[in-house]
Image (cartoon, grey):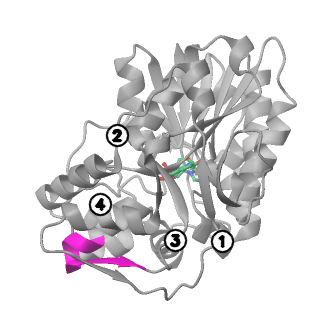
Amino acid sequence: MRVLVTGHQGYLGTVMVPILRAAGHEVAGLDIGYFADCVLGGFAGDPAGRRVDLRDVTVEDLRGFDAVIHLAALSNDPLGALAPEITYDINHHASVRLARLAKQAGVRRFLYASTCSVYGAAGDGLVTEDAPLRPITPYAQSKVRVEDDVAALADADFTPVFLRNATAFGFSPRLRADIVLNNLVGYAVLTGEVKVLSDGTPWRPLVHAADIATAFELCLTAAAVDVSARAFNIGTEVNNLTVAEIAGAVVDTVPGSTLVITGESGADPRSYRVDFSRARDILGFEARWTVPAGAAELYTEYTARGLTEEAFFHRFTRLPHLRGLCEAAVLDDRLRRISVRAPA
Ligand SMILES: NC(=O)c1ccc[n+]([C@@H]2O[C@H](COP(=O)([O-])OP(=O)(O)OC[C@H]3O[C@@H](n4cnc5c(N)ncnc54)[C@H](O)[C@@H]3O)[C@@H](O)[C@H]2O)c1
């Protein structure tokens, strides 16, 4: 298939593109490139792509593709809290506009990167896709709104699918240090401490970036009747862990590290355990990576590629990096770039 990946120069996109190509798809990218230069060590390089702001996409950008995989977004809660209206602009309005234009351009399949954080404060029971959605943050609310609005576009010629990904982990050359396992391993490598800021009790389902990529690949070719306008939790019950358990896996992996639970950020209301049986039954999806295996991979890559404190706390952490681009006048206060229509 000819597949357009938005956000191909992000953490997940950089892992996903080679996996889609290996499955035989022809891949192109579209990204504003906020993190294009944020690479740890070498990598094979990006596919042909366009440097376009999602808010400015035209129908011409989308013609000729069989499918769009839509990853581009302000991708976490701190970013959403910093600028809720920009989060709604990009993550909600521009995403729904993208789906409408894709349909108009004759794209038949639209795979959307949603999140398990749509379940919010869900307690200790396992939540299925039919559980009530209780998004707590602007980031999670924007994801729910896109699911609702894009589901309404589904018809015989247009198949939207919503992949509610667990929190990702694992090495990507375009690293993100602000997601829990990547963060805990990096901090331990740099300081010797596995530092948990919450009280450690919230449930956090985790899934490896490569497993997410496999789930998207399965959704490209699944029968439309099985997936159209449906949500799928993407992860595995084995990786439904508390933050304290995740931290324990890191202590076991990083030699000489010690666990410190500070509790300084107070109770974290975002807590959910997730049932992943729908993706297993309908897509045949099985996540392969466990958290200890992911911690070991991260430890190996961080040490081999020479992770530094500056890179960990700034270049690979979304919020300070974007703040830096604004201070350097690369981006304006709406996070828009100058001279954006260029090869990515
Ligand atoms: N990483 C996770 O744990 C996780 C979990 C669940 C869902 N998701 C979702 O998956 C998607 C990808 O996540 P990620 O971790 O790779 O995030 P990321 O921040 O690494 O990548 C996002 C990409 O989107 C691009 N982008 C942002 N705003 C844009 C705009 N206005 N125009 C064009 N491009 C723009 C950025 O330049 C970046 O390359 C996001 O939608 C995120 O919400 C991620």
Q: CA distance from mark 3 to mark 1?
A: 10 Å
**Label 4 within 8 A of ligand 1 by Cβ:** no
Q: CA distance from mark 2 to mark 3?
A: 23 Å
Q: Quadrant of residue 67?
A: top right
The residue that appears at 37% across and 73% down in the rendered structure is 314
Residue indicated by mark 1? 269
Q: Which residues are magenta?
A: 187-196
Q: Are marks 2 and 3 in contact (CB under 8 Å)?
A: no
Q: CA distance from mark 1 to mark 4?
A: 23 Å
**Label 3 within 8 A of ligand 1 by Cβ:** no
Q: CA distance from mark 4 to mark 3?
A: 15 Å
Which is more foreground, mark 3 or mark 1?
3
Q: Residue furthest right?
A: 152
**Mark 1 surroundings within 10 Å by alpha-carbon count, few (fewer than 14), some (14 through 19), many (20 or more):** few
- Residue 61 place in picture, x, y as percent: 64, 30
In-image side of 5 versus 105 (left or right) = left
Q: Amino acid at mark 2?
A: Trp
Question: In the image, which disc is placed on residue 249?
Answer: 4
Q: CA distance from mark 2 to mark 1?
A: 26 Å
Q: Amino acid at mark 4?
A: Ala
